[in-house]
Image (tube, helix red, strand yellow):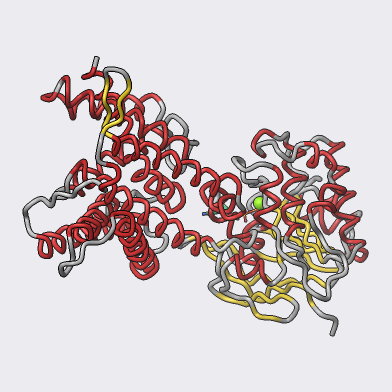
Amino acid sequence: MATEALALTGIDAYYGDSHVLYDVSFSLGEAKLLGLLGRNGAGKSTSMAVAMGILPPRQGTVSVFGADITGKPPEAVAAQGVALVPQGRRIFKSLSVAENLLVAARPPRKSQSNRWDFDRVYAAFPRLKERQGQAAGLLSGGEQQMLAIGRALMGNPRVLLMDEPSEGLAPQIVAEVMATVKRLKGEGLSIILVEQNAQLVFDVADDIVVLNSGRVVVSGPAATLSHTDLHQHLGVY
Amino acid sequence: MTFWSLLTVNSITFGGLLFLLSAGFSLIFGLMRIPNLTHGSLFMLGAYVGATMVGGLIGISTDFWIAALVATIVVAAFGAVIERFLLRQLLGNERAQVLMTLGISLMVADFCLMVWGGDPLNMSTPAHLGGFVRAGPLAFPLYRLAIIVIAMIFAAALWYLLDRTRLGAMIRAGVDDAEMARVVGIRVSRLFTIVFALGAGLAAFAGVIGGPILSVYPGLDQDMLPLALVVVILGGTGSLLGSFVGSLIIGFIYNFGQALLPELAYFVLFLPMLLVLILRPQGLFGRQMP
Ligand SMILES: Nc1ncnc2c1ncn2[C@@H]1O[C@H](COP(=O)(O)OP(=O)(O)O)[C@@H](O)[C@H]1O
Ligand SMILES: [Mg+2]
């Protein structure tokens, strides 16, 4: 069996008494890209919160490269090499651009070939370099998204979770973000890309998982899924 | 002329003490989202420990600055213990944590009463800072000027720590968005302990150097805590600049109010707080709470 970079198995998750994820299972292969689709409120962000250790599941397990991390706090999950680009970006607004990167920096693991540091992040996103001394809260939406991605990369992750990175951005910026995603995948990073826009995902994904009302309704290699299947669960896209 | 300039120096001196007290209070509030109601007690505890050592413990009187250092370290360690072993048990339950800090403050007050009794302790100023500084016809107490200088040095050091170091950036990230800080790998719970110990140590240090001016008495805690609260409401939580400016403003209002309108001193003190709460609830330099 190939190593799974990240696996959720039989996850049931709640916010208080409200049951949000029902027996959710999916796994991300090493150096693969998994597209996680679903309508608004389907449970995509909640799945990411469970994977990151923000929301401990009531049932089921989460594992990273075979290590069980169920119930571990986010800082421990980060130490396992998981990084999140959250929905809404959530950059540290009162910190400068450089400080946002600094606080997230984590030394690479020994086996890691593509190492991230300030120079490489700035090379990937030149606009961040131009604005490194500025308060991050003053950046444009697109720049904030670049910063959120750069911040995640500074942790030298092996698994990157990206929650709707195209949300609210102009088409040209979306194209830039998607180009970055492709490049990261090409470098061997294992990625989960959460999207409402299925078309964006189909270009880059190896596998697709569709959530609907907290349940996995479609799961399989992108190549074998017909668009009509997805239509049924996602509506017009 | 003499009256006004002395009042001004006293205001700035008191503002300096308030800054040392409220900087930690503000940081704790910003990061942990709780008003630490033991903060006045930590100030008082520092003052008692310092006064006792300076006054002579088992016949040996300690140098003022060594006493200040010891009191700071002891109370900082006490703060770390409070955070690590008591508040930590109630993580995520801010209301219970606030009640816990209130309970500890009452226990500290009782403890001090038991150990040091009900009479005020007078603390002498360090010998080398006794006299006056003359400027033309005016004479200012050297010790009060020294407090101003010390407060400025601490302000600069705290600014450096918070604004120029990685630890400081991590603390500010935690103030901004604690959950996201944990997601990027920052051990926010360790920051809680560090900030709580730092705040406790600063409060204790303020208590010692304030001792010769304020004297040390039961109830000192309850006199200081509301002032820290007003400063932080005025300046905004989690903002060092806010505590700095807020402390100066309150230092002036408090001293001028006591001198000119003694019967309305508290009214004058809390009026700006009410105005800020109504007009700018996040404080002069604070951010909107998420
Ligand atoms: N913090 C929260 N507290 C309570 N309910 C929540 C919270 N966050 C999300 N939900 C609910 O959980 C469900 C799934 O939300 P979410 O995972 O954010 O969906 P998606 O990311 O697919 O749009 C929704 O019904 C949403 O209302
Ligand atoms: Mg979402």
Q: Residue furthest bottom?
A: A1
Frontmost residue, B8 versus B186:
B8
* Horizontal relation, residue A209 to residue B127: left or right: right
Q: Is residue B218 visible?
A: no
Q: Residue furthest left?
A: B118
* Horizontal relation, residue B216 to residue A103: left or right: left
The answer to whether residue B19 is above or below residue A108 is: above
* Horizontal relation, residue B41 to residue A56: left or right: left
Frontmost residue, B39 versus B101:
B39
Q: Would you identify the image quadrant in which residue B62 lies?
A: bottom left
The answer to whether residue A226 is above or below residue B245 is: below
Total numbered labels: 0
Q: Would you identify the image quadrant in which residue A67 lies?
A: bottom right
The structure residue drawn at horizontal position 32% and vertical position 64%, both measured from the top left corner, is: B74
The structure residue drawn at horizontal position 29% and vertical position 45%, both measured from the top left corner, is: B128
Percent coordinates x, y for residue B106 in the rendering:
18, 58
Q: Residue furthest top?
A: B1
The structure residue drawn at horizontal position 34% and vertical position 45%, both measured from the top left corner, is: B21
The answer to whether residue B146 is above or below residue B170 is: above
Ligand 1 lies in quarter:
bottom right
Percent coordinates x, y for residue B1 in the rendering:
24, 14
* Horizontal relation, residue A182 to residue B2: left or right: right
Q: Is residue A128 visible?
A: yes
Percent coordinates x, y for residue B224 in the rendering:
24, 43
Percent coordinates x, y for residue B144 in the rendering:
29, 36
